[in-house]
Amino acid sequence: MVLKIRNVTKSYPGQTADDAVLRGVSLDLAAGTSLALTGDSGSGKSTLLHLAGALDHFDSGEIEIGTTKLSRLGDGQRAALRRQEVSLVFQQFNLIPSLTVRQNIALHARLGGRWDAVWGQQLADRLGLSGLLDRYPEQLSGGQQQRVAIGRALALRPKLLLADEPTGNLDETASAAVMELMLELVRESGAALFLVTHSSAIAQMLDRQLHLKHGKAA
Ligand SMILES: Nc1ncnc2c1ncn2[C@@H]1O[C@H](COP(=O)(O)OP(=O)(O)OP(=O)(O)O)[C@@H](O)[C@H]1O
């Protein structure tokens, strides 16, 4: 299993156990599979995604990425895990404006010590970015920018790809195209995809769906 979440609870300052954002959430995600997380605004979707990415701490329960238990890691080990095993794609594409498409795609893989130029070129080809490699993000459409962000995320060959409303800034046509490419590449690379979305149409494109309500997942 790439991601195991067991009975995780999380509250923010000022919240009691009864109104905690997450009140015992469990899920499993295997390599090469995808899971959509849906739920009302404020139900805790982004919170759970951040916990899965070791970006924040949970109160109780356990999260495992591969065989690593997140509760046992110090800050340095968490940072190393994020650099090497986990990639993130957000609604805001978060590209570096002063870097070209080519440099943006390579950025995280280089930082993680995992840059593979052949794989990087394959990703650029598959994402339709080969003719745009010397451009800067501001010279791209929203759909193209998000494809760069997906290329950057997958260039690392992460075990786990986390995506928070990855097509939330795109129109319907661009959104469907970006989702299809991302799902294809996730399957081929053997990564596990955990994706937050408001859209039931997008959720249905993934292998499984989970709905967050009252701090629990069903
Ligand atoms: N850093 C924080 N400090 C305090 N409360 C927070 C913090 N982050 C989130 N919350 C609260 O936790 C709850 C869940 O937030 P979260 O962003 O996880 O929900 P979401 O389901 O992703 O919402 P949306 O669909 O609107 O993005 C909300 O009530 C929010 O106000």
Image (spheres, grey):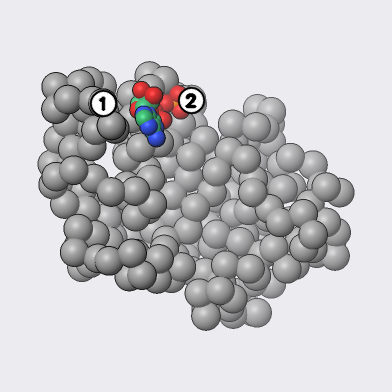
Horizontally, residue 72 falls left or right of residue 166, namely left
- Residue 155, given in percent of the width and then of the height, sits at 57, 67
Residue 44 - label: none
Label 1 residue near ligand 1, CB within 8 Å: yes
- Per the image, the residue denoted by label 1 is 14
| Neighbours of disc 1 within 10 Å: few (<14), some (14-19), many (20+) | few
Label 2 residue near ligand 1, CB within 8 Å: no
Question: CB atoms at circles 2 and 1 under 8 Å apart?
Answer: no
Residue lying furthest front: 14
Quadrant (top left, top right, bottom left, bottom right) of the N terminus: bottom left
- Per the image, the residue denoted by label 2 is 199
Mark 2 or mark 1: whose residue is earlier in sequence? 1
Frontmost residue, 7 versus 2: 7
Quadrant position of ligand 1: top left
| Neighbours of disc 2 within 10 Å: few (<14), some (14-19), many (20+) | some
Q: Comparing marks 2 and 1, which lies closer to the viewer?
A: 1
In this rendering, the answer to whether 201 lies above or below 46 is above
Residue 8 visible somewhere in the drawing? yes
The residue at 42%/41% (across/down) is 195
Identified by mark 2, the residue type is Ser
Give the secondary structure at mark 1.
loop
Identified by mark 1, the residue type is Gly
The residue at 59%/76% (across/down) is 110
Give the secondary structure at mark 2.
loop
Residue 35 visible somewhere in the drawing? no
In this rendering, the answer to whether 3 lies above or below 51 is below
Horizontally, residue 17 falls left or right of residue 155, namely left
Residue 218: name its quadrant: top left
Frontmost residue, 165 versus 121: 165
